Structure formats: structure tokens, C-alpha cells
Image: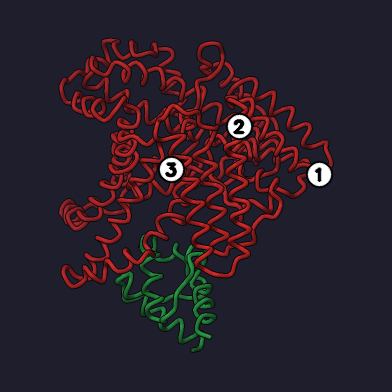
Chain colours: A green, B red
């Protein structure tokens, strides 16, 4: 899967989790950029991403992930 | 040793001199010695066996978890150590068995467990030098009442050379004086009113109780955040920048935001090491799937989070003292606020459109801030009252009499502060309010630093003398203990 494809899929997950059709995430998107992305939603988001890609994040990754770009990198590593 | 005592200031001044004249490589060793010394003179020296035992277990545990390959073994080791440390904390602190608890046990336990769990999460290498780990766990400014530090954030700072820098020392000292101002000028005064009313709660009612409750909220905030200013400032003079623990919490628009701005490092700790792991357990990941068929995706998700939050808030309350008044006042009540706020959101939305209230309207924001303050204050009545029953009686007694006359017949000056003292308290609170407002826009110290030298010194000395002259040192010139030190 290419990085672009990962982002495309991530967009779908984000739109679904945050219930907003016009979300588009980029490399630098962080929790500050999406209104409902707080510590509660974070864990739901993680679960949704895991389900979409069929992967499992470690707790360490969950608590240190800084932006969506980092998330995509981890996803690609896990898929490789 | 109380950090507002003269003894502490002497200790600190001596440390500062020694710290900057010894070879830079040994600076962290000096800090460790100072921390051990601080511990020993603050209470029973033999109690240091507890932190020594904890550090040894955590040190060995982290090395083991890092080295061993099988996930199962890692998990068992981690669980055993967590159970051991938490049980020790509960036995010494929360079960009230009459045992002496070492200073700062609830803080250093969390700090060290955080480190151990980070190693388990594979967020960095374990520390191989036990003395360095000891300094991290018992660094004296944070030992008293936080902030709860993280090894991965602090290791770059704690063990490296810190040459003397003018800015660190001046900024740090300014910050300390600001903390003394909050603690000695405001908190101690508020405490007089609070004690008068809370200690004789059966004879007070109406506005008197309201005043005392509001005073306690200010007392606790200025006490705890003042303590943080002192320790963060003290640490800054040593060149070590600690994380912030408060971000003007009473400007929060709702309770969730309040908890992101009050005791910040505790919130982060609980999120990373309790709340997230809890939500990732089998039980909590399967719960929404089970509930989905019955009540739909959204509700299923909500029920799951609210259940996990219930456990989280119970823990926060329990951590404060292990009895119901804390469990309710600093825990379950806040859970109720947050959950009811979310569940009733459609209702609020309707009301807002009905009354044409705009989200960013200044008046509305102010209303929300006052609401936060009121809700927090209700919780703190439980926190301060003798027990849950006393808190309920006090809250009920507010509505038992209508006595606004206390504001003009002088009765308000019989609560522990005469009119002069009362005026000092109000003026000081206004100074705090203005500075906090300015702080929201821009760092107050950066603003001060831009001023010309004479202005800077006048500001600094004005505050210093304000504190020296108006500080309420209590009987025998030793300030009352920090409220949060007991936790």
C-alpha cells in the first residue's frame, strides 16, 4: 500500500469516527486541528484505524503518536 | 521542612551556591544528596527505607522487563510490581492503619511506576545507574507534591551539566516569589475563613457557607498552584525545567477542560497509564460490540467510555485520600458533571438556539466560567468538610437562611478576617486575576523581561515586599502545611 492510499483510507476512518464529511487529514494534522479529537476519542480512533488496516498499535505508540504523518508511518511499517 | 519556611530558604540558598561551584559532572549527585537530606529533615529519617525499597524494585524490574524476551514474562513482572507498589501506597496512605507514610509517597509512586510502564511500553531504554533513577524518583522539588515527571522528558535535563545562567536564576526566583505571594498572602488568609466556618459548620448557614466554600476553592488553588510556582521556580534556578501543573483552570468553560488545566500532570499520568490501558482491555474493546445491537453504535460507544471514566474518576478521588468525601468530591461528582453534560448536550443545544446564544459570545463564556467555578466549589465542599454527611449538611444549610445582611452589618468580618485583612485578601485576589488574564495572552515573565531594568526591579521588589509585609506566616512564623502535601 502506498502512503497516499494510507491517507485516503485514514480520511475515511476520520470522517466516520468524528462524524464529519469534510475532514481531510495531512502529514501534519494533530489533535489540535480536529475539534472532537480529545483524549477520549483518541482511543476510539485508534481502534477504528486498527480495524481498517488489520493491525494492532502498541500502547507506547498510542500515547506518543504526535501527528497523522507519524500514524501513517507506523501503519506502513506494520503492513510491510 | 516546609517550603515556605525560613529553614527551606536557607537550605535552598546553600544548595544553589554548592550546585554552581562543584564540578559540573557532579551536579546531579549534589541534587541527589540534597533530596535525601530534604527527605530526612522533613520527617522521620528511617522512613527513607520505603523509597529505597521502591526504587530498588523499580530499578531491577525495569531492567528485567527490558531484557526478557517473552511478552508473558514481561507482563507478569509488570503486574507484580504494580500491585506491590500500589498495595504499599494503599496500606501506608489510604487504609488509615496508623502507619507513618513517607513524604510524597503518592507522588513518587506514580512517577516511578510511570517510568516502569514506559519501559514496558518500549518507550526508551531503562536507566542502568540506580542513583540516577533515585534522583529522578526523589528529586526534591517534585517530591513534595508534584508535578509528576516523566523519565523520558526529564533524563536530558536531570543528569547533564548546568552552567550558571542569569536568566534561569532570575526567572526562577521571580516564580518562587509569585508562589509565596499566592501561598502566604492569599491562601493563608482564605484558610482563616475556611477554618472558622468548616470547623463549626452546624452554626453557619446561607451566604456565610457560600463565602467559606468560595474561600476554600481559592485557598486550595492558591495553595497548590503556589506550591507548584515555588518548586518549578526553585528547579528553574537549578537549570531544570519542570512541566507545568496548572493552566489557569478557572477560566475553563466546562469540567472536562478544567481537568485538562488543573493538576495537569496527574491527568496525563492517569490517561496514559490507567485510562488508555483500561479501554484497550478485552472487556472494554468488546463492550461496544456487544451493546451495538441493542442500542446503536453511538450509544454503545458512549456507555463504554462512561463506564471506563467511572473507574478513572473513582481512582482520582481515591488517590486524594481513600475516603468517601474525596471519592465523591474529587471523583464521582466530576464524573457525573462530565457525563450529564454530554448526555444532555442536545438539550443545551436547543436552549442555546432558543435564546439565540452564540457560542463565542463573551457573556456566555463568562457564564460558563462561573458555572465551572460553582461546580468545582461544590465538589470541594466535600473535599474540605469533615465527611460526606457534614458536606451535605453544609450544602443544604446554604438554602436554609437568606442572610445577605452579613455583607453590610459587619458579620462577614467575624469569620477570621477583619476589614483590613479582608481588603488585603480581595486586592490580592484581584492581582492574581489580572495576572492570570494577562498570562493567557502571553507569558507574564516575557512581558516583564521586556521592560527596562528599573521597572523590572521595582516590580520584583514590590511583589517581594508585598509578600514579606503581608504574608500570613501563622503562629510561630512557620506557614501552615501545604494542603496537597498530605496527598
Is B388 on the left or on the right of B457, as rendered?
left
The residue that disc 1 covers is B24
Q: Which tag, 2 or 1, sits closer to the chain's start?
A: 1
Question: Furthest residue to the bottom?
Answer: A1
Residue at (48, 42) in percent of width and height: B246
Image point 41% across, 70% down: which residue?
Answer: A46
Return the residue nearer the eye: B88 or B167.
B88
**Residue found 49% across the figure and 39% down from its top:** B106
- The residue tagged with tag 3: helix, strand or loop? loop
Residue B7 on image: x %, y %? 65, 21
Give the percent coordinates (x, y) of residue A44: 36, 67
| A70 lies above or below B39 | below
Q: Earlier in the sequence, mark 3 or mark 1?
A: 1
Question: Which image quarter: residue B210?
Answer: top left
Which chain does tag 3 point to?
B
* Residue depicted at 29% across the width and 36% down the height: B374
Nearest the eye: B194 or B362: B194
Crowding at dot 1, Cα within 10 Å, few <14 / some 14-19 / many 20+, comes out as some
Q: Position of residue B169 (x, y in %)?
A: 70, 37
In this picture, is B301 found above or below B368?
A: below
Which residue in the structure is indicated by mark 3?
B262
N-terminal label among 3 and 2: 2
Q: The numbered mark 1 sits on a residue in which chain? A: B
Residue B176 disc label:
2
Whether residue B463 appears in this view of the structure is no
Query: Which label sits in the foreground, 2 or 1?
Result: 1
Amino acid at each position: 500500500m502506498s502512503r497516499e492510499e494510507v491517507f485516503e483510507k485514514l480520511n475515511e476512518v476520520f470522517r466516520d469516527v468524528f462524524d464529519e464529511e469534510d475532514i481531510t487529514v495531512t502529514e501534519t494534522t494533530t489533535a489540535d486541528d480536529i475539534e472532537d479529537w480529545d483524549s477520549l476519542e483518541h482511543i476510539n480512533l485508534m481502534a477504528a484505524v486498527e480495524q481498517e488496516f488489520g493491525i494492532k498499535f502498541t500502547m507506547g505508540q498510542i500515547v506518543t503518536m504526535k501527528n497523522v504523518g507519524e500514524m501513517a508511518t507506523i501503519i506502513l511499517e506494520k503492513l510491510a | 521542612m516546609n517550603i515556605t519556611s525560613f529553614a527551606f530558604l536557607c537550605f535552598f540558598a546553600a544548595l544553589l551556591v554548592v550546585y554552581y561551584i562543584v564540578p559540573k559532572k557532579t551536579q546531579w549527585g549534589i541534587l541527589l544528596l540534597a533530596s535525601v537530606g530534604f527527605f530526612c529533615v522533613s520527617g522521620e529519617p528511617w522512613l527513607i527505607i520505603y523509597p529505597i525499597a521502591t526504587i530498588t524494585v523499580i530499578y531491577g524490574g525495569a531492567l528485567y522487563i527490558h531484557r526478557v524476551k517473552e511478552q508473558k514474562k514481561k507482563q507478569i513482572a509488570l503486574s507484580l510490581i504494580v500491585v506491590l507498589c500500589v498495595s504499599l501506597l494503599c496500606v501506608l496512605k489510604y487504609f488509615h492503619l496508623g502507619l507513618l507514610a513517607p513524604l510524597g509517597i503518592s507522588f513518587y509512586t506514580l512517577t516511578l511506576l510511570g517510568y516502569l510502564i514506559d519501559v514496558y511500553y518500549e518507550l526508551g531504554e531503562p536507566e542502568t545507574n540506580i542513583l540516577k533513577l533515585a534522583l529522578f524518583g526523589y528529586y526534591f522539588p517534585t517530591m513534595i507534591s508534584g508535578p509528576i515527571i516523566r523519565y523520558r522528558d526529564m533524563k536530558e535535563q536531570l543528569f547533564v551539566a548546568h552552567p550558571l545562567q542569569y536568566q534561569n536564576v532570575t526567572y526562577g526566583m521571580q516564580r518562587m516569589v509569585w508562589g509565596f505571594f499566592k501561598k502566604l498572602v492569599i491562601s493563608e488568609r482564605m484558610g482563616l475563613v475556611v477554618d472558622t466556618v468548616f470547623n463549626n459548620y452546624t452554626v453557619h448557614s446561607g451566604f456565610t457557607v457560600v463565602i467559606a466554600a468560595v474561600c476554600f476553592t481559592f485557598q486550595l488553588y492558591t495553595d497548590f498552584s503556589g506550591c507548584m510556582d515555588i518548586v518549578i521556580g526553585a528547579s528553574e534556578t537549578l537549570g531544570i525545567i519542570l512541566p507545568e501543573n496548572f493552566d489557569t483552570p478557572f477560566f475553563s468553560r466546562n469540567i472536562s477542560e478544567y481537568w485538562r488545566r488543573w493538576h495537569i500532570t496527574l491527568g496525563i499520568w492517569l490517561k496514559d497509564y490507567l485510562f488508555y490501558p483500561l479501554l484497550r482491555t478485552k472487556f472494554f474493546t468488546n463492550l461496544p460490540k456487544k451493546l451495538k445491537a441493542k442500542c446503536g453504535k453511538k450509544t454503545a460507544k458512549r456507555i463504554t467510555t462512561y463506564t471506563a471514566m467511572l473507574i478513572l474518576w473513582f481512582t482520582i478521588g481515591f488517590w486524594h485520600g481513600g475516603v468517601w468525601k474525596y471519592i465523591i468530591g474529587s471523583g464521582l461528582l466530576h464524573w457525573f458533571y462530565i457525563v450529564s453534560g454530554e448526555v444532555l448536550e442536545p438539550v443545551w443545544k436547543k436552549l442555546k438556539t432558543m435564546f439565540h446564544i452564540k457560542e463565542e459570545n463573551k457573556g456566555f463564556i463568562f457564564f460558563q466560567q462561573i458555572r465551572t467555578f460553582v461546580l468545582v466549589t461544590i465538589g470541594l465542599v466535600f473535599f474540605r468538610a469533615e465527611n460526606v454527611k457534614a458536606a451535605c449538611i453544609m450544602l443544604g444549610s446554604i438554602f436554609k437562611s437568606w442572610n445577605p445582611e452579613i455583607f453590610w452589618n459587619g458579620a462577614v468580618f467575624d469569620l477570621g478576617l477583619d476589614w483590613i485583612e479582608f481588603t488585603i485578601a480581595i486586592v490580592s485576589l484581584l492581582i492574581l486575576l489580572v495576572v492570570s488574564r494577562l498570562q493567557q495572552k502571553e507569558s507574564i515573565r516575557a512581558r516583564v523581561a521586556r521592560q527596562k531594568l528599573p521597572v523590572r526591579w521595582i516590580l520584583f521588589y514590590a511583589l517581594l515586599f508585598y509578600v514579606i509585609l503581608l504574608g500570613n506566616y501563622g503562629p510561630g512564623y512557620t506557614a501552615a502545611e501545604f494542603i496537597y502535601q498530605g496527598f
